[in-house]
Image (cartoon, rainbow, N blue to C red):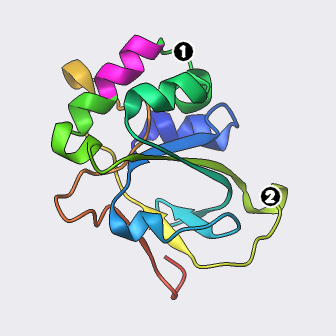
Amino acid sequence: MREEPLRWILTGRKTIEVRVAYPNLTRLSPGDRLRLNGQYLFVIRRIARYRDFEELLAHEDPAAIAPGWTPAQLREALRTLYPPEKEALGVIAFEIAPEGEAYGAAGTSGFLGEAPQGPSGASNPSGTGASHSDGSHASTDAAGG
């Protein structure tokens, strides 16, 4: 993850991580652990699935995804990161919390990789990870991420 979204997560300002529904991500469940940038352990508290970014923004608080960004800025950043064919896979919102603050800490571990730049070279506000064509930017890893 990029520095700014990671800082938002670590300070509790960003509690929702957004990704497109790559197959490896659809296997995750509430209670599964995520290792952010190889060192910060978080637990998935809730998972919501949406058809597209419009539906996501109609149901999730944009401030929990990208503090200080308007819904329009967030939509633009997500569509810059994920082209239409990726958005067509569906969208997943993961509500996350530090492992000590979340219920059900048992589960598979995973990690989230570095996010590419958002619009105009700005940090990606959603912290949505690297956009690899095979969806390998986040994966379950029984070895602990």
Residue 21 point in image, percent of width and height: 37, 55
Q: Which of 141 and 50 is in front in this view?
A: 50
Mark linked to residue 109: none
Residue at image mark 1: 68
Kind of residue indicated by mark 1:
Gly
Residue at image mark 2: 102
Q: Which residue is drawn at 24% across and 22% down?
A: 119
Q: Give the range drawn in magenta.
A: 71-77
Q: Is mark 2 on a helix, strand or loop?
A: loop
Q: Which of 49 and 139 is in front in this view?
A: 49
Question: In terms of image quadrants, where is residue 26?
Answer: bottom left
Residue sitting farthest toward the bottom = 143
Q: Most prominent secondary structure in the magenta stretch?
A: helix
Residue 79 point in image, percent of width and height: 26, 30
Q: Residue at x 22, y 30 (%)?
A: 80
Rendered position, 50 above or below 123:
below
